[in-house]
Amino acid sequence: LASAIALAPMAAMAADLTIGFSQIGSESGWRAAETTVTRQEAERRGIDLKFADAQQKQENQIKAIRSFIAQGVDAILIAPVVATGWDEVLEEAKDAEIPVVLLDRTVDADESLYLTAVTSDLVHEGEVAGQWLVDEMNGEECRIVELQGTTGSSPAIDRKTGFEQGIEGHDNLEIVRSQTGDFTRAQGKVVMESFLKAEGGENICALYAHNDDMAVGAIQAIKEAGLKPGEDIRIVAIDAVPDAHKAIADGEMNATIELTPNMAGPALDALEAYLADGTEPEKWIQTESRLFTADDDNMAIFNEKKDLGY
Ligand code: GYE
């Protein structure tokens, strides 16, 4: 008690924050790492983090957010599973004067309904993937299959758009099949199997997957079909999780674009400043996207990243 009284008022204030976090679920390795890092960031700052796992369902997220509002939390973090359908619950948080920060995915809602969004440039990531394939093929014909993320999620929509922009004007490149694999390894494998069956493995030149987990599942399907992933079928995806670096090091995958699992760091910085003295953050806090290929020391990066919450 004596040491608690001795705390400076500012530190005591930060230590008193209670923040609700409505997480999507644990569909991918990246998502699990984001959860770990968010818990670490909250603990480091003495924030009481109330964590709710929505098991991929928007209705569960809405319930969790309503319960955070009822508990009178100081702020709410939301990783929104899909882009639409948030207006009502965000209005409720606004009426209760509880600031909301979006993590890693965006929403189709008026931006006055949230304080800021911490995300990567999801369209740009798709463009970088497309551009990589343009350079790699250098004019050669290439029939592409695409594994999309969760239907209706902003990364699935934006990464598709971005990739199409990246390959636009290159008539040698054609997307012949595109289907959702829901951002999971299991679905990535199942859907890749159906692509291989429908097209014939030798007629597929490249796979673009909206995340690494689906690519890793697809690698398994490609091997089981007797083909060499990374050679017979080139593979580019997004997240740069440790397993993708390993697959690139093993020559079974060609490129990935990094998405930091630390969205909570910038989000909590913005919230702490806002709650302390009303400092308004930028509406979009953009995280970096960097391309990794076989030119990088992927084994070293794999080992480093193992300590990052993955
Ligand atoms: O790339 C994927 C995840 O929302 C941008 O969600 C994020 C994506 C990430 O499950 O692996």
Image: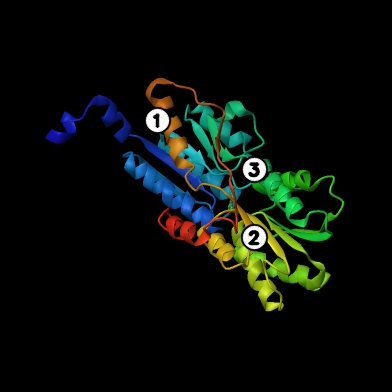
Residue 62, quarter of picture: top right
Which residue is identified by label 1? 272
Identify which residue, 70 or 247, lies in the foreground.
247
The secondary structure type at the circle numbered 1 is helix
Q: Residue furthest left?
A: 2
The secondary structure type at the circle numbered 3 is helix
The 10 Å Cα crowd at callout 1, few under 14, some 14 to 19, many 20 or more, is: some
Question: Residue at point 73% right, 55% down?
Answer: 136
Asked if residue 91 lies left or right of residue 303, the reply is right
Q: Position of residue 239 (x, y in %)?
A: 57, 52
Question: Residue at point 56% right, 64% down?
Answer: 249
Q: Position of residue 161 (x, y in %)?
A: 75, 44
The secondary structure type at the circle numbered 2 is loop
Question: Residue at point 41% right, 33% down?
Answer: 74
Which residue is identified by label 2? 254
Q: Earlier in the sequence, mark 2 or mark 3?
A: 3
Contact between labelled residues 2 and 1, with CB atoms less than 8 Å apart: no
Q: Earlier in the sequence, mark 1 or mark 2?
A: 2
